Amino acid sequence: MSATPAIAVADVVKQYGERRALDGLSLSVAPGEVFGLLGPNGAGKTTTVEILEGYREPDAGVVRVLGLDPVRDGARLRPRIGVMLQEGGLYPGLTAREVLRLFAAYYAEPDDPMALLARVGLEDAARTMVRRLSGGQRQRLSLATALIGRPQVVFLDEPTAGMDPHARATTWTLVRELAEREVTVMLTTHAMDEAEHLCDRVAIVDHGRVVASGRPTELTRSLARDEVELVSEPGIDVAALAGALGLGSDRVRERRPGEYVLAAPGTPDLVADLAAWMRDRGHRIDVLHTGRRSLEEVFLRLTGDDAAPTAVPGP
Amino acid sequence: MRAVLAQSRAELALTLRRGESLLVSFAIPIGILVFFAEVAPVSTDLDDPVAFLVPGVLALAVMSTAMVSLAIATGYERRYGVLKRLGSTPLSRGGLLAAKTVNVLAIEVLQAVVVVVTGVLLGWEATGGLVLAVVFLLLGTVAFAGIGLLMAGRLRAEATLALANGCFLVLLFLGGMAYPLEDLPRILRDVAQVLPAAALSESVRAACTPGVAVPTWSVVVLGLWAVGAPVLAARAFRWEE
């Protein structure tokens, strides 16, 4: 990580009346990184992003974007950042093209509005009023307004919420292009596959604190479990299978008809023995799942109501 | 500067696309001018209804644009998150306010032209101190814009819509615009004396009428509203609904 982070958040506290939205949140994002904020609803993701955008001031702690204080140095920072709000922010009575041209006029060296409109897949909707655009189209126009000023840091609050798969793919491509141009991106998302595909690093936020952070692969590896899942026909002799694999008979069980769980690390040897045994008995293998948890599982484990604080290595 | 120009152009385009706002800004003042001058002069004791009506309708036009249109447009911009979104662009609050001012003044100039031309066609002779009248109309614009932004910055968009139209109607009745304040019952006249609508129409009418002194009370009331309403609006304004 470079010496000066693009985004630095240290021990930030934000209180809304009785509710503590952020409770000592800290994170750091390097220039050119795509950073994902994950967490359940109400965890503090949007509050964090809106503090970084200069919309709210923290009650305690220090926040810097490109070395600037988002509120005090707002006038110097705003030309260098791009913002996509979770919803709204567009004049319903202007066309897509008018909106983008208007936003282009706010910045010193903007991107070409029509070219950007084409890149987000809205060239056919250029003359359509915002109020007649679909939800996904509005999301893409909102994304375009975040990019029109050629920002150095982009904040995307749930950028693909409500998008169809096609629009989502377009958005992912755009975010990857930003990363290639060394633009720093901070995005929030509920979609774990999005985080896994797009983000260099993620932080999982719950109750206003970072409960885990790191590369998506680090997070999933750190919580790898010694378990193999197998889906096949129902009624396989689990005792015989356990014996063949050299496991205690209680370590192989049929969780639901046709769904088997082996309490053992999914090593290549085990998988080879399992496959040989299944072949000899003429059993199918429909699904075989070993080891690594998906980010989704990590997320659910860390942010559930009964989630105990889990030690997860930081970045 | 480029940002403020582009913003002004966008605001103007939005205003001109809102049919209902044009109805309030143009059709109602002209309708009142023509109706009360030609069809149903309410007060028989007015020897020159057009001379009475033109200044009042100019005041009404200012009220419709600076209060009603501005409040409704701004209220819905707040509802749709537009104001919030602009807050993270390089367009400053001052720049946004400048663009809205340009928008309001441009519509008011159009209204004034239409009202004056209609008035002249109805026989109005512009003889008074028009510079002073313009100064009062600008003062009225500040006062009514303050009231409009106070509603828009604090209430839900639907409430702003209802209240702005309601105020427009009440202030039209109590504004000395379509008929003289003297036609009102005493109690209503007293209330009207402290409201900005009558203060504006009386001031403008006096300025437009040769040999009539500008009523101090009206100018003082107008000045107080022009200072108080924007100050209150600035303090109460919330950028997010």
Image: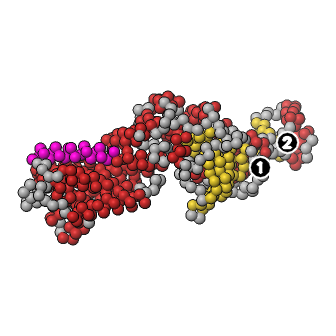
From the image, which quarter does the C terminus of chain A lie in? top right
Query: Can residue A201 be seen here?
Result: no
Q: Give the residue drawn at x 38%, y 60%.
A: B231
Q: Is residue A219 above or below residue B207?
A: above
Which three-letter amino acid code belongs to the residue tagged 1?
A: Val
Q: Earlier in the sequence, mark 1 or mark 2?
A: 2
- Provide the secondary structure element on which disc 2 rests: loop
Which three-letter amino acid code belongs to the residue tagged 2?
A: Pro
Query: Can residue B127 be seen here?
Result: yes
**Is residue B114 shown in magenta?**
yes
Q: Position of residue A213 (x, y in %)?
A: 71, 47
- Residue assigned mark 1: A312
In front: mark 1 or mark 2? Answer: 1
Q: Give the residue drawn at x 58%, y 50%.
A: A69
Chain for numbered disc 2: A
Specify few, some or many for label 1: CA neighbours under 10 Å numbering under 14, 14-19, or 20 or more: some
From the image, which quarter does the N terminus of chain A lie in? top right
* B172 horizontally vs A291: left or right: left
Chain for numbered disc 1: A
Tell me the number on the disc at residue A265.
2
* B38 horizontally vs A158: left or right: left
Mark-to-mark CA distance, 1 and 2: 20 Å
Q: Position of residue A39 (x, y in %)?
A: 65, 50
Residue span colored magenta: B102-123
**Is residue A256 shown in magenta?**
no
